[in-house]
Amino acid sequence: MNKIELLKIKEKALEDHIPIIMDDTLEVVSNILKEKEPQRILEIGTAVGYSAICFSEYLQEGGKIDTIEREIDRIVQAKQNIKKVQVEEKINIYEGDAVEILPTLKESYDVVFIDAAKGKYPFFLNEAMRMIKVDGVIIADNVLYKGYVMSDYNKHKQRTAVRNLREYIAKITQNPNLETEILEVGDGLAISKVKNLSKV
């Protein structure tokens, strides 16, 4: 992997105010991936491809990342970035809305990383649970959403996102088949390890 190009991708994304995975969040996720050595990763929300490129370093030989993005200009940038860093053979981009694409996927994944529309997190979780392998890990970024999720925040603009993120947290913490921890890194990171899929 070309680390210099990766640094340029990160700097440009920050310059253009494109939300990418924060350094401390990336460190936590990288440690999980290092330990797990995944064969297949599903990422919901590609943006410009930065996180997928970072994750690709931890795949097993011949491993693959499927990542989903709906915004055309970001897809174009992601493809360019993936090519620059020379990891095209490791990353496959599904172009379109994750709500439509996810139900069509038939793969099984070792890790699912959720970082897309906050109001859709409960739906993304249901789909992730359908495809995650036993002993797999579901990771969701931005679950505390600027602190709103754990406060009594109720302003109209973000109300749906906040309500659905609260629902996501309730589902992952109350599901007996998941072992969940929520870390206050970045904008909140939820890590759910699958213990048992028999009752999911």
Image: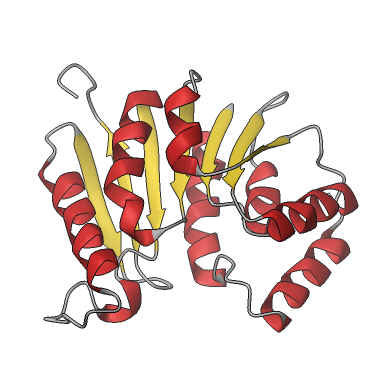
**200 or 4, which is in the foreground?**
200
The answer to whether residue 69 is left or right of residue 75 is left
- Would you identify the image quadrant in which residue 138 lies? top left
- Residue at the (79%, 69%) spot, across then down: 7
**48 or 183, which is in the foreground?**
48
The answer to whether residue 90 is left or right of residue 3 is left
Question: Residue 100 location, x and y as percent?
Answer: 46, 35
- Would you identify the image quadrant in which residue 156 lies? bottom left
- Residue at the (54%, 62%) spot, across then down: 27
The answer to whether residue 196 is visible is yes
The answer to whether residue 38 is visible is no
Question: Residue 4 location, x and y as percent?
Answer: 87, 65
- Residue at the (87%, 47%) spot, across then down: 83
- Report the colour scheme: secondary structure
Question: Residue 33 location, x and y as percent?
Answer: 53, 43
**9 or 137, which is in the foreground?**
9
